[in-house]
Amino acid sequence: MAIQRILVADDEESIRWVLAKALEKQGFIVDLAEDGLQARTLARQNHYDLAVLDIKMPGIHGLELLKQFRVDYPETLIIIMTAEATMEHAVAAIKNGAYDYLTKPFDLTALDAIILKAEKAAELTGRIDQLKEELQDQCNFGRSIIGNSQPMQEIYKILGRIAGSDITALITGESGTGKELVARAIHINSQRLGKPFIALNCAAIPHDLLETELFGHERGAFTGAIERKTGKFEQADGGTLFLDEIGDMPVELQAKLLRVLQEKEITRTGGEKTLKVDVRIIAATNQNIVSLVKEKQFREDLYYRLNVVPIKLPPLRKRRDDIPELVDFFLQKAKQEFGIDSMECSSEVLALFETHRWPGNVRELENAIKRAVLLSPNQVLIPVDFPDLLEGEKSLRKSESLEALVAQKLENSLARMNLKEMNNLYEMVLHQIERPLINIVLQKTRGNQIKTADILGINRNTLRKKIKILDIDVKQSRN
């Protein structure tokens, strides 16, 4: 942040004139005040990056004015001037928040040096404020993990219980469910906040390079190793190392990882010296890790070492209540990214989202919205803005079996119920399936109960009982 506007307050006109000419010559905008009251009035009317205040002024004493500035205009840097070079004045000025202190008479070069230093301090303060905002954004769960559905509430409870400790966690879930977001949330809410968060996708690194990515290597360790390289463990020292897709790690490397977890030390490839590391491990996988253990593709001892706290993330289709909130979040994010002021989703689009199975989960939803916001000419997004989803729904309707369709409907319905308070779920679901089934067959047979019983494969008396219990209007089916 560069200094642009300066307030000079001094009851001596000659001092005001000299400072104004010198500062304006350097390109600053300068306002002048002949006493403390006028300085306070100007400060209320304008924003000043820097104020040069004399201590002894009529109206309001300079030190008192300094105190008011520190409360009302904390971003304004203050330089105090005085003709009395007493220790009491100097101490009082700095103690009350002055950036620096000048004793009259002073050389203008001294003021120039202070202003230059103040500009650098202002830039540094601006950068610190920016970093604080970025950190606050990271710490805000609502900006990273979206959703208040029952499955997500259970996840939040687990995060709250483990974040403050150094316990190891294993996050499982389908691709696109937000495993890295959860790992970051754990780190941000832990005592390791401010230390590195390092993420490594084990599936994205060739097996023969994964070891050096993790542990680093010494110069000359192998052909092409022309200099020492630090690995992810060293980079994450004091912080958190997130190992994504841990199920793809080669078995021989798993043994070395297990040793690091046990001994808390590493050895670079090609090196002999052991290095102590203080790293919290959070692992994740979209594979069935238990099956990998049974198939001897993943070490059982490493699995138990990682799986101290299991965190299973629900797929989007099992947390459909969160879809509207997710849509709103991703829509706002895309609008900001592409500089679009006004755009919203129609109710038809939300209905489409409610029925889509989302094999790519939250990531698929975000990408679909981002693509539609970028390409759609409309201010209100409609289903045709999501051609991939429409095509997917058509294919799904053609390919899915009756059982799968019923299962999907049941899954959607049950997700909205509090199953803990249910005691007649079987009977309730059975009635909801039987009633439309019998109605449809009765309509096909134009109310002929004998033919309906034959088609359903039940006797006529059973059919009559069900018609009565389910309160089915047979006369309506004859029309």
Image (spheres, grey):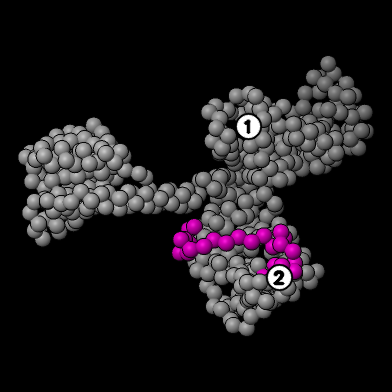
Q: How far is disc 1 from disc 2 in space, using C-alphas?
A: 46 Å
* Crowd tier of the residue under label 2, counting other residues whose Cα lies within 10 Å: few below 14, some 14–19, many 20 or above: few
Vertical comparison of 453 with 477: above or below: below
Foreground: 101 or 256?
101
Quadrant in the rendering for residue 327: top right
- Name the side, left or right, on which 233 lies relative to 429: left
Q: Is residue 326 magenta?
A: no
Mark with earlier residue (1, 2): 2
Rendered location of residue 385, percent (x, y): 69, 29
Q: Which residue is mark 1?
A: 373
Q: What residue appears at the point 85 percent right and 18 percent down from the top-left corner?
A: 478
Disc number placed over residue 395 in the picture, else none: none
Say how many tags the image has: 2
Rendered location of residue 74, percent (x, y): 27, 46
SS state under label 2: loop
Q: What residue appears at the point 54 percent right and 74 percent down from the top-left corner?
A: 277
- Magenta-highlighted residues: 188-212
Q: What residue appears at the point 85 percent right and 26 percent down from the top-left corner?
A: 442
Foreground: 23 or 252?
23
In the picture, which quadrant includes the C terminus?
Answer: top right
Disc number placed over residue 224 in the picture, else none: 2
In the picture, which quadrant includes the N terminus?
Answer: top left
Quadrant in the rendering for residue 231: bottom right
